[in-house]
Image: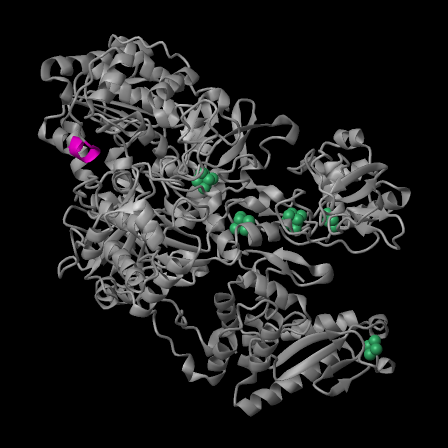
């Protein structure tokens, strides 16, 4: 899902003068709720982090148009808000995928080659750590220790751990999840994989 | 504490109140006000504690930990910048423990720092390098991973080298706290922390205005202007102070000179005009001084009117000028001659130019481009207050509780004054912006009154109506300090909110709110500019502004006032020096026999009695053949004046045209003799900024080629006309001007320090006047002058359905001859992007970057468009910076009846889409100035 999907139109600015272009955020109750959240609070000192938390609660992540609205209302620049959002681990700038893939990079897994697992998973998904595939199926999150060091190297898809992995096996696991997800959505898995590739490296400004 | 020791430490204990805090720093006893940090206390005592993240003009971050000091009795070392002094503190700034800690900090920084000082721009001027040297830190051995990020060089102005960045955050703070843009911040965390914009956008998209103040504060080589790369080592450059040649703010700047050439610029911190701030033009706009296109020798036209302009000696050129002017005077009388002086030239030069016209040529036909920007201010404020200048000072704006900004796109046209307005907002002031466009300031505004172009008088009268009827006005002030209230109130009677809302398009509720804000503040200031003055009702607009301020008593105190922002760097000075047809220096009326007598005696001539012609009238008279000879200094009316086609014909009809300029401008190309003048960087003189501050500057480099300072040229021309004046230096010229001009009476070159002097300064011991009209108005009582709304001269109709408004862009200036020669500025904004509203664009099938033909009753131009909601539907906005899309071919020479200022802000036009191939090409002389990576 593209970030801007839910909105895109300009929102009316509450200022005097000729009416601004009307928009239609009403199509989605969450956007209306956002406006309620911002009203009155956006300019109060100390409200930035609570507001970010509530916005994330609302959308499951921090959509860019919502941060842009926050910037408009708060007089903080989008750049500063983004800086805060990327500083705290709790905030996500992209929606969570259908499945969360946690690859362990803790010490035991590291010793047993988690770097190769991580690399293969990134290749397979076409995204970096902390990102979500363009088809919305996977989010990739590195974790420090999953607490099952005996099975190292380990990754977990949602609540299911997969231990004693090889890069090939990790790849197979992910492909199975993708096939199932696509079948459920009635989509063609091959085209889906290509779409995921095309979405790769969208965050090119931060070389990993 | 021993008084003599304290005296040695550089400040007076005698003045120290009892509650000052006493402490000892490295064995020195001192007393400082409570709340002072250890760092500042130590600096006062002459102890230099190293810092990387501290900046005196920014908030304290306490991030770098290099300023650690030992405080006796404390468990840990303290960050000196962030720790306030305490009574009887004993501080050691260089104890072994402190030195050890600093070494560790520096080692950690160097661990991740490219050791490439040899090719770093800041070698020799880098704080990290200096401290690593001071503490003899060894080069790291690098066992772990080294951070590496690709540099960001996506914009034409400067490069951010992430690997050299020490994350001190000074750039982030200056951008947020001073510039109030917040284009950058720390993003991500830990090892991966970087200073970036949101979503990895380039600075261009992130709202950066390229003021370069972040570059100036960076303590290392992480932010470097592109022009500096390879252009000179720090020890090869000398920094020379001067005054920015662009806008009326008059920022003090420093230019770096290497081998007789300018290689860089930065803000100077010693003038109250800008207090260390700067904008993109001051920082990046100086290349024109050294352009290969500069005129380096006089030119004369040989072989009649159709012959070519050829290089000539000064001797020949000056002879031709004197003969040409004298012949016309003999044959047709002095009033067949006219001169245009220049708001870009110094006070001394403007004084000489009007003296040349009046004393040597014998005509009052002298004017300059102020006619085109603020003639209505001079006329209007002189009527209301008796003095036509900004009442308060720039720095003073930050003290206002409410600011009403009307018809001023301050952050773009007067950027450093824009910073003061943002500072006021940051301090809690309410900001009301009245402008047809959604200008950048509206982002900071509490209220944006988006009025229809040309309805200022209605709006201002409407606000006054509310304040008057609701009884919010300052009756005491009105009674004690003003006159004419009765007559005025009768004129304002019809302007009830409903009526005004209909005329202006501003909702009633917004009008009420604005009136309440403005009237109920203790200190409210009005800032206005060309959006008020450049109308056929310009003088009325100015009077309406003055009425509103008098009604609420917002005059004569800090944080109040009526503050017109003047456009050109020395337009205030050119007016002060009498480069106007009806007044002599100091606004002394030519029609007053006593005034004529005074000047006549001093100059040894009889002065012409009748006021002369204004710029627009001079052009008309030339077109009719009444003006036969014209002497232009630093003006390019072919591009800057309304109805440009008409101006060109007028100049072609002249018998004799002299142009004195730094480039072969469109006007100079038509001249019979062209005299090469010099830029601000090559001469000495004074400029008077918009707050009446007279500032002195000295040459930074030698004149290019055979070019000569304009004041020297004027003295030579006068001499050849039989008037040898013995004021042979700028200081002597200003002395003479001051002796005849009461408001400048006490101003002498030798008195002008870094802060200059603000006129009125009547006597040699007068300290200058930061705020006008404190006790009484210059004319005695302030005059309520009734004004009524008149429609703009030309309104849209079926055939020409759009209102065209013209104005400026942050990145260029005037007709572009200076700013378009800056590689950075011209690469960033290479061509006109006329603004058109989304809805109109959709109807006309125009997309961003498409080309349109814009046509008025006077002419038509081609320009690329920007689709935006900055302009409301029905309005098109163009700048006048681009000669290939010259907006002034479209504007009308419709004049304000009093000030004779043209209505640049409203003309009716039609817009039509044309093929992309029709996009006008960037003129060759500017195209080749582009940065190499942008040339294709
Ligand atoms: S150039 Fe000015 S606006 Fe841009 S990032 Fe630097 S300080 Fe901010
Ligand atoms: S770029 Fe310079 S000023 Fe900005 S954080 Fe890095 S070192 Fe400090
Ligand atoms: S604000 Fe005006 S005077 Fe100051 S640097 Fe910019 S252009 Fe120059
Ligand atoms: S280190 Fe991987 S599960 Fe503990
Ligand atoms: S200067 Fe004090 S912590 Fe940086």
Which region shows up in magenta?
A: B614-619
Q: Residue at x 49, y 56 (%)?
A: B425
Q: Is residue B855 left or right of residue B707?
A: left
Query: Considering the image in quadrants, where does the N terminus of chain B appear?
Result: top right
Q: Position of residue B102 (x, y in %)?
A: 82, 45
Q: Is residue B465 left or right of residue B623?
A: right
Specify the quadrant of the image occupied by residue B114: top right
* Figure label count: 0
Q: Position of residue B816 (x, y in %)?
A: 35, 39
Q: Is residue B751 left or right of residue B323?
A: right
Residue B770 in view of the camera: yes
Residue B346 in view of the camera: no
Q: Is residue A68 left or right of residue B520?
A: right
Say above or below: B446 vs B292.
below
Q: Position of residue B536 (x, y in %)?
A: 19, 47
Frontmost residue, B58 versus B477:
B477
Q: Residue at x 52, y 56 (%)?
A: B426
Frontmost residue, A142 versus A65:
A65
Q: Position of residue B51 (x, y in %)?
A: 73, 44
Say above or below: B792 vs B599.
below
Frontmost residue, B621 versus A131:
B621
């Amino acid at each position: 899902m593209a970030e801007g999907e839910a909105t895109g139109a300009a929102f009316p600015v509450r200022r005097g003068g000729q009416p601004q272009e009307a928009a239609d955020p009403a199509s989605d109750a969450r956007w209306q709720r956002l406006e309620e959240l911002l009203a009155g609070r956006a300019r109060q000192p100390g409200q930035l982090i609570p507001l970010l938390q509530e916005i994330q609660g609302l959308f499951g992540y921090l959509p860019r148009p919502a941060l842009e609205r926050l910037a408009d209302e708060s007089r903080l620049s989008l750049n500063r808000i983004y800086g805060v959002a990327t500083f705290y681990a709790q905030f996500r700038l992209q929606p969570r995928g259908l499945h969360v893939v946690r690859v362990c990079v803790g010490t035991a897994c590291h010793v047993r080659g988690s770097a190769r697992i991580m690399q293969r998973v990134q290749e397979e998904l076409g995204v970096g750590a902390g990102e979500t595939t363009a088809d919305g199926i996977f989010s990739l999150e590195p974790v420090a220790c999953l607490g099952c060091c005996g099975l190292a190297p380990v990754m977990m898809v949602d609540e299911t751990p997969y231990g004693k992995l090889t890069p090939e096996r990790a790849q197979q696991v992910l492909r199975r999840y993708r096939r199932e997800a696509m079948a459920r959505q009635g989509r063609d898995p091959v085209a889906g994989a290509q779409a995921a590739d095309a979405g790769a490296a969208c965050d090119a400004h931060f070389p990993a | 504490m021993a008084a003599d020791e304290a005296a040695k430490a550089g400040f007076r204990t005698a003045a120290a109140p009892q509650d000052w805090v006493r402490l000892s720093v490295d064995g020195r006893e001192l007393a400082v006000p409570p709340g002072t940090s250890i760092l500042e206390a130590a600096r006062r005592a002459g102890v230099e504690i190293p810092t990387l993240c501290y900046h005196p003009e920014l908030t304290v971050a306490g991030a770098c930990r290099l300023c650690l000091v030992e405080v006796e009795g404390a468990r840990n070392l303290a960050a000196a910048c962030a720790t306030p002094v305490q009574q009887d503190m004993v501080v050691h700034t260089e104890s072994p423990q402190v030195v050890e800690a600093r070494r560790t900090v520096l080692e950690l920084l160097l661990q991740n720092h490219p050791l490439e000082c040899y090719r770093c721009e800041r070698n020799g001027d880098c704080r990290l390098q200096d401290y690593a040297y001071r503490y003899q830190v060894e080069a790291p051995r690098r066992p772990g991973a080294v951070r590496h990020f690709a540099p960001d060089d996506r914009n034409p102005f400067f490069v951010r080298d992430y690997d050299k960045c020490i994350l001190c955050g000074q750039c982030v703070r200056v951008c947020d706290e001073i510039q109030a843009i917040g284009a950058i911040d720390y993003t991500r965390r830990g090892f991966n922390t970087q200073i970036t914009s949101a979503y990895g956008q380039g600075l261009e998209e992130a709202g950066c205005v390229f003021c370069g103040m972040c570059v100036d504060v960076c303590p290392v080589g992480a932010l470097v202007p592109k022009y500096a790369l390879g252009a000179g080592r720090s020890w090869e450059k000398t920094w020379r102070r001067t005054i920015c040649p662009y806008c009326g703010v008059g920022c003090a700047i420093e230019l770096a000179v290497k081998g007789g050439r300018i290689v860089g610029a930065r803000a100077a911190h010693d003038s109250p005009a800008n207090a260390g701030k700067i904008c993109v033009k001051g920082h990046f706009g100086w290349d024109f001084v050294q352009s290969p296109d500069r005129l380096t020798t006089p030119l004369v036209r040989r072989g009649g009117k159709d012959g070519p302009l050829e290089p000539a000696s000064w001797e020949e050129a000056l002879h031709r000028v004197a003969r040409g002017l004298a012949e016309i005077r003999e044959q047709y009388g002095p009033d067949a001659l006219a001169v245009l002086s220049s708001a870009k030239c110094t006070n001394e030069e403007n004084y000489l130019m009007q003296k040349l016209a009046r004393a040597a040529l014998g005509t009052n036909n002298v004017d300059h481009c102020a006619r085109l920007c603020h003639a209505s201010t001079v006329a209007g404020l002189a009527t209301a207050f008796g003095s036509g200048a900004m009442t308060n000072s720039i720095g003073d704006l930050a003290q206002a509780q409410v600011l009403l900004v009307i018809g001023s796109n301050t952050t773009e046209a007067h950027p450093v004054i824009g910073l003061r307005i943002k500072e006021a907002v940051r301090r809690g002031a309410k900001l009301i912006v009245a402008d047809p466009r959604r200008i950048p300031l509206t982002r900071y505004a509490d209220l944006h009154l988006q009025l229809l172009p040309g309805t200022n008088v209605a709006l201002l009268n409407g606000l006054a109506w509310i304040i008057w009827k609701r009884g919010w006005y300052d009756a005491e002030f009105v009674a004690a300090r003003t006159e004419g209230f009765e007559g005025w109130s009768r004129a304002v009677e019809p302007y009830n909110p409903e009526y005004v809302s209909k005329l202006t398009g501003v909702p009633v509720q917004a009008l009420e709110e604005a009136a309440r804000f403005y009237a109920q503040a203790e200190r409210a200031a009005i800032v206005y500019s060309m959006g008020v003055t450049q109308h056929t009702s310009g003088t009325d607009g100015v009077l309406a502004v003055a009425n509103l301020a008098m009604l609420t008593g917002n005059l004569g105190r800090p944080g109040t006032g009526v503050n017109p922002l003047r456009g050109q760097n020395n337009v205030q000075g050119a007016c002060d020096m009498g480069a106007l047809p009806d007044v002599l220096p100091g606004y002394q009326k030519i029609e007053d026999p006593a005034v004529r007598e005074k000047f006549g005696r001093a100059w040894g001539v009889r002065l012409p009695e009748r006021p002369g012609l204004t710029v627009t009238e001079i052009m008309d008279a030339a077109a009719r053949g009444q003006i036969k000879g014209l002497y232009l200094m630093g003006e390019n009316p072919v591009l800057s004046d309304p109805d440009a086609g008409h101006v060109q014909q007028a100049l072609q009809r002249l018998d004799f045209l002299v142009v004195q300029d730094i480039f072969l401008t469109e006007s100079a190309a038509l001249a019979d003799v062209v005299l090469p003048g010099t830029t601000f960087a090559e001469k000495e003189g004074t400029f008077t900024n918009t707050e009446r501050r007279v500032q002195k500057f000295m040459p930074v480099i030698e004149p290019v080629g055979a070019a000569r300072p304009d004041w020297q040229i004027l003295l030579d021309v006068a001499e050849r006309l039989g008037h040898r004046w013995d004021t042979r230096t700028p200081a002597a010229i200003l002395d003479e001007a001051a002796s005849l001009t009461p408001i400048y009476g006490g101003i002498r070159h030798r008195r002008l320090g870094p802060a200059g002097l603000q006129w009125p300064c009547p006597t040699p011991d007068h300290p200058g006047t930061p705020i006008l009209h404190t006790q009484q108005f210059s004319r005695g009582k302030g005059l309520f002058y009734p004004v009524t709304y008149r429609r703009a001269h030309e309104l849209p109709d079926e055939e020409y359905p759009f209102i065209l408004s013209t104005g400026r862009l942050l990145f260029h200036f005037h007709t572009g001859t200076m700013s378009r020669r800056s590689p950075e500025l011209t690469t960033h904004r290479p061509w006109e992007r006329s603004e058109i509203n989304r809805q109109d664009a959709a109807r006309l099938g125009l997309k961003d970057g498409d080309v349109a033909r814009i046509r008025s009753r006077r002419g038509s131009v081609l320009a690329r468009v920007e689709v935006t909601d900055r302009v409301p539907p029905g309005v098109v906005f163009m700048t006048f910076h681009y000669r290939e899309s010259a907006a002034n071919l479209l504007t009308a020479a419709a004049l304000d009846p009093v000030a004779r200022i043209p209505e640049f802000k409203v003309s009716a036009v039609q817009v039509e889409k044309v093929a992309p191939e029709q996009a006008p090409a960037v003129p060759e002389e500017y195209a080749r100035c582009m940065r190499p990576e942008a040339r294709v």
